[in-house]
Amino acid sequence: MTASADGIESIDRPLVEPDVLERRRYQVELARSAASGHTLVCLPTGLGKTTVSLLVTAGRLDEAGGTSLLLAPTKPLVTQHAAFYREALTIPDDEVAVFTGEVSPDDRAALWERARVVIATPQVVENDLIGGRIDLSDTTHLTFDECHRASGNYAYNYIAERYHADAERPLVTGMSASPGGDEEGIRSVCENLGLASVAVMTEEDADVAQYTHNTDVEWERVTLPEEILAIRNSLVAVIEDRLERLKELGVTRTTSADVSQRDLNRMRGELRKLMDNDQSEGYEGMSVHAEVMKLRRAVTLAETQSVESLRRYFERQRNAARSSGASKASQRLVSDPKVREAMEQAEGYDDLHPKFRRTRILLAQCLGIEGGERVIVFTESRDTAETLTEFLGAHFETRKFVGQGDKEGSDGMTQTEQQETLDAFRAGEFEVLVSTSVAEEGLDVPEVDLVLFYEPVPTAIRSIQRKGRTGRQAEGRVMVLLAEDTRDEAYFWKSRHEQSTMTNELGRLKDSAGEIESELAQQGLDAFAGKPDPAAATPSVEVEPGTTTAGDGGQSGLTAFGPPTTGEADTEDRSESDGNESGTAERDESVEDESVDESEGIVATAAGEGETIEIVVDQRELDASIARDLSTREDCETRLETLEVGDYVLSDRVVVERKSVSDFLDTLTGGDRSLFDQVGDAARHYARPVVVIEGEDLYDERNVHPNAIRGALASLAVDFGASVLRTTDEADTADLLHVIAGREQELDDREVSVHGEKGSKTLVEQQEYVVSAIADIGPVTARALLEEFGTVEGVMIANEEDLLEVSGVGKVTAERIREVIGSDYEP
């Protein structure tokens, strides 16, 4: 260790910049524990969890080499960690790489090869692992920041599984100030990430206490004025009316507007059962349920946020009701007399919510009378954040801090704007930061004199995250505003109970870490957390072809049923369905990897190499667990593409279109013919198109006549030459794809072909193909154009006026066709 000019000791270690990190004993001890095995590190917010991880990373890179990977849940956190690592490590800045969706997949693959430290959002790393763009075998340290997120299908869980399986020398560190609300939650985090040890420091520890100060939490109640109560009561009356309807349907016994969210979720489950049985009551009830949810949101805004936030919410509901395709729930909501009365009351209310005035008074006390310098105000609603910023800006130097996107139409803040705002706050350029939840987790928000909760938050984890913004360098205050007799009360008690439970659990973890670790080991976590002992591995046994080993029960695998040894791909023409213009179904575009170029779909094929099979997966299939499952199999590699045809490509002749039972039945009951368009496209590119229908109760899920279902299956098989296969769930689908791909690539040694092995198109198909490619106009419009002009040449020389005479061609399409055909080629 070394001492700086002011006498503060700094850390002196290999790969750590001298005189940058203050030596804190508790951080060094935690780093030592984390370096010895897969460890959950628990430390109060603001006391340097990232420093602990950095020390482990530096030691690991120095001793074992390889690459270090740090995952953080948000882009601002990734940027912040990267800046810290570049400052505190001696390795060149360009060897600390940042992976977010803004970096293209090809660039990430190149960066991975030369980086020593990669700091990334988990969704991007998940996509790169599934797509085979990165390899974790030489990653010697993996850190999960804010590891309490490791639950359900969150990307942390998949990455942890891949890391423990693929890394030659794995070491995992999980970091959180609040790993879970109870012992079960904390243990679940450890199990999901493969953490076998727990290292906890609390503010009660002497080594930590000297770096913290008391943070008093004060609760202040405010009383709602009669005008706001009147708005609430109008909305409550409508909620009770709608619950009465749901009671008549038999899905609830209560009509109280205070019904819990748990009960509402249970009602939704009952309504779903009715819908699955194709009972009209289920669809009617689900629409009423949607109204209840919207009305509860309106009540919450009126009670706990501001009338201005409520007005903005009502305006969005009116716009939604006027839009094309508006739901019946939205239309009924805005036309209900009581709701309209509440809207008029809100429009006529020209005063402020009492929390606004109380916020201004508390800030004046802190920044004026008490000489404070900085305050953070947290609020749940972006509307409230914007209104508060404007209101407080008349009295204090105030800026907002919100996320980058908003489902309700707000532009939000860019990552650059967020960083500039935080930098200015640190530099003292303004006094008050009004923030939504984006500043809660891990961001290096500067020390403040007061953290003001505009409303209680319902979970202990978020409450702890927010409180951690004060009390690090000097005594700090936390104030929570609570509107009496509102949902604030329920959130207050819920958060208080959870926080007490979590504090006790952390204390128990610290006192009995050995016992917890023993329990984790007994559950088999030690096998997950470490590489198997090579000496204990079962020796390989050579088996004669066609024989079986005792371990497989004497049964032949499905791949033993090889393909026919003769016969070429079927090149017989297949009829086309007269379906939708588009050849692909609407898909979920929620994958975080923003850098994927969606502008050009491709027809891709998978090729086997040696004993490894490859499966090409459409990017939009990532919501399912199938690609993740396949990518974890030793003999299988997955590659992500934006496919023009199909969901999975298994060879140069096999493409798979996957549909759930519900999606398949939608094609029969909803008039959606996209499935037949998709299979038609697949049949034109691949000799062996396959349709997988996933799920059970194909004939019982809906009130659809069995012959209608059989007719659709027959059309797929006879008209399109598609094989229709059934699976029970996503795991079963993954197994089936794996078997087919192995059969194609290993037993039949299929060749690589970018466009499949489908036979040559007929002249008609080629003509339609050429015309449909013009400006992406599609097959239906292509056929109409060819029928009108007779030849491809006729279409090419037609002017805009002639094109407009063709059915289905509007002005925009005609202009686009002429632009593509008549523009100069300028590569």
Image (spheres, rainbow, N blue to C red):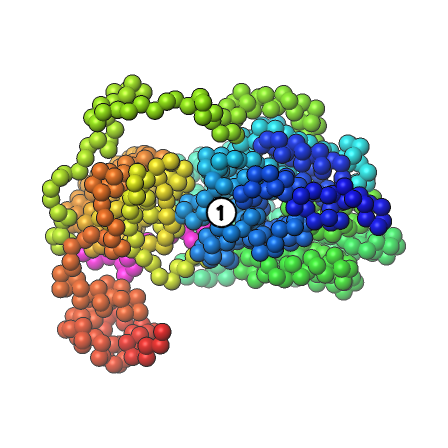
Q: Position of residue 222 (x, y in %)?
A: 75, 47
- Residue found at x 68% / y 60%: 421
Q: Position of residue 77 (x, y in %)?
A: 61, 50
- Residue found at x 37% / y 39%: 630
Q: Quadrant of residue 398?
A: bottom right
> Is 577 placed left or right of 36 in the picture?
left
Q: Quadrant of residue 458?
A: top right
With respect to residue 642, does 782 lie above or below?
below
The span picked out in magenta is: 576-592
Q: Position of residue 536 (x, y in %)?
A: 44, 21
Secondary structure that dominates the magenta span: loop
With respect to residue 750, does 206 lie above or below?
above
- Residue found at x 33% / y 48%: 616
With respect to residue 42, does 681 lie above or below?
below
In the rendered image, is residue 113 in sight? yes
Looking at this view, is 139 or 370 the one in front? 139
Q: Amino acid at mark 1?
A: Val
In the rendered image, is residue 281 in sight? no
The residue carrying mark 1 is 125
586 is within the stretch colored magenta: yes
Looking at this view, is 457 or 736 the one in front? 736
Q: Position of residue 54 (x, y in %)?
A: 65, 43
> Is 149 placed left or right of 697 in the picture?
right
727 is within the stretch colored magenta: no
Under tag 1, what secondary structure?
Answer: helix
Looking at this view, is 699 or 548 the one in front? 548
